[in-house]
Image (tube, coloured by chain):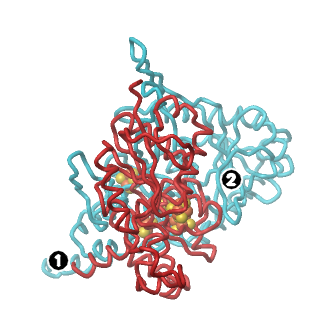
Amino acid sequence: MNNKPRIAFFDFTGCEGCQLTVIDSLENHPELLEAVDIVQFREAMSEKDDDFSIAFIEGSCTRSSDEKRLEKIREQAALVIALGACAHLGGVNAVRNIQPLESVRRCVYGEKAEVYETSIAKPIGDVISIDGFIPGCPIDPEEFIRGVKRLLQGNRPLIPDYPVCIECKLRENACLFQRGKVCLGPITRAGCGALCPSLGVGCEGCRGLIPNPNITWLKEVMAEHGQSSERISAKMGLFMTNQILESEVIDVES
Amino acid sequence: MTLKILPKKALPAWLDGLHANYRLVGPRAKQENFVFDVIQNAEDLRLDYNTTILPPKKVLLPQQETILQFDTSKDFHQVEPVFEDTPTVLFGVHTCDMHAINLMDQVFGQGYPDAHYQTRRQHTAIVTLECLNPCTEFCFCKSMETLSVPEGFDLHITDLGNVLAIEIGSGQGLTLLQHAKMVRDAGPKDYQHLQDVMSEKWPRFAYQLDFDITELPSLIALSYKTEVWDSLGDRCLGCGICNVVCPTCNCFDVIDEVDFDLQSGSRYRIWDSCQLDRFCSVAGGHDFRSSRANRLRHRFLHKFKYQPETYKIVGCVGCGRCAQECLVHISPVDVLNELYRRQVPFASIEQEVLV
Ligand code: SF4
Ligand code: SF4
Ligand code: SF4
Ligand code: SF4
Ligand code: SF4
């Protein structure tokens, strides 16, 4: 047996897009396969070995059975990294969290609603401790590769803590607000290279909030640009339901 | 002053000549806006541009640049600095941005001279352009005394309609002009024409600041404790756009990136912004400017107090880019006038007491 770091990938509630992006990233960086041993990756291989030291977890936690599985991974892995918006934030799945669970279940499963277990969608960091995260829906392949290299060096992935606006301006985009559109760039964590604004589409916030975002005033800006409060809430709730709920609790308390 | 005259119809051929011999960078359209970029075809150059999203500073200090390459696998750790020395002509720089470049030259030239900046600067010739109309409703160059070209340009162009008046600022400028055909010396009529255009342009620009810029350092110092900062801090998104678009901001972050062997890699720098939440976080987690109000005040202190005191150049050239891009409409002119307005009553009270 060699002494390369042993890496495993796990999936919970998500679309598997982040795992696909990992597979994609290998195309440009085949060196990764020489630097590590991938011992478990359901999306890409049938072998399965439970001796791993770094676990990448995709998907949110939506069932009590998920929690047990997560705890088991945590026991084995020296490092646990949340992979993508669902694992990091709860992801799009978390839009259910502001609706009654019963109606959510009925809407999704119809008559079979009673058969399936489901609960609110939680980021995995709410269930087990995590050592880092690779944000985004889906993740950015280059950021994933850089993150792995940092882990191999014994560091956490270096994820920007500044907003998308910085990358948007570094790329010299005209601001979408000046072109009659709205954008969550000022409160959303950068790292995607301002992907959406660069393509003319407002940021949806898939990488989550920056530290200490000024949500109140971004709402004012959106209202000034003709957005109703329903639209503003809907936009902010797509990826950031859990984070916005949390920040509102903090607002009320303070 | 040595003044030359170039018919406008000879401009494309001149640009082609420059493009053949240098990396030619100038303003070109990007959707409804303008950006400084490499000019491949003469017709792409837009001397009628109003302003650019990013300032021409980016040619001398790129948004992101590799500064060295390392390899620690060898017995002697190998470290190779990376310099960019492509001969470049930066064409069509407005006078405010030239003032800003002069400030950058000081910032990156004093103390520890920055060899990466210096190398680019030494290999860049600058052709400036006289502004005949305010570029946007946000600019306040006249108040900041940047509406005239400062020293440091190699050539300076004023659009006289059918011809361009070209002032030669350096031997390097003269060399650039040798790539142009149909250049002639200016005659008395040309000087007169230039003078007319210059005196007509002046009233088109308004003074926006309610006071003289020599008062700025003391005004900002006296305003250290005003609640203006708190209300601005409430509104400010902490997005950092104002720093990124500013021609005089010079802060950058330095990041190492290793290859998969974990031994070799490169170090790059990337523009940073003092309005960002973690700008002042230090080892151990302490953040000595954790509120947006404090960070905003710092930005004003740096531009209007520290820089004029250190370099004898005000750290804002009035280009208006930050005011134009700020989503919550925080504009230096408004802030400064508000600070001034709040100072005046105190000043007059003092005088009354003295009388
Ligand atoms: S388009 Fe979005 S990300 Fe870009 S500057 Fe405007 S608000 Fe920021
Ligand atoms: S711009 Fe926003 S929504 Fe788009 S990839 Fe980046 S963080 Fe996600
Ligand atoms: S651009 Fe405006 S909102 Fe953004 S950091 Fe600067 S002052 Fe604050
Ligand atoms: S502070 Fe604003 S107006 Fe002044 S130079 Fe910078 S971007 Fe231009
Ligand atoms: S401290 Fe702030 S205002 Fe001053 S140069 Fe740096 S980013 Fe610009």
Mark 2 burial class by Cα count in 10 Å: few <14, some 14-19, many 20+? many
* Residue type of the residue flagged with mark 1: Glu
Which label was assigned to residue B27? 2
The C terminus of chain A appears in which quarter of the rendering?
Answer: bottom left
Q: Is residue A142 visible?
A: yes
User: In which of the image's four quarters is ligand 3 placed?
Assistant: bottom left
Q: Position of residue A218 (x, y in %)?
A: 44, 76
Q: Is residue A76 above or below residue A67?
A: above
Q: Which chain is red?
A: A
Comparing A47 with B196, the one in front is A47
Q: Tell me the shade of chain B.
A: cyan
Q: Is residue B333 visible?
A: no
Q: Position of residue B352 (x, y in %)?
A: 17, 82
Q: Is residue A227 above or below residue B222?
A: below
Tag 1 residue: B350
Residue in the picture at 80% in, 36% down: B17
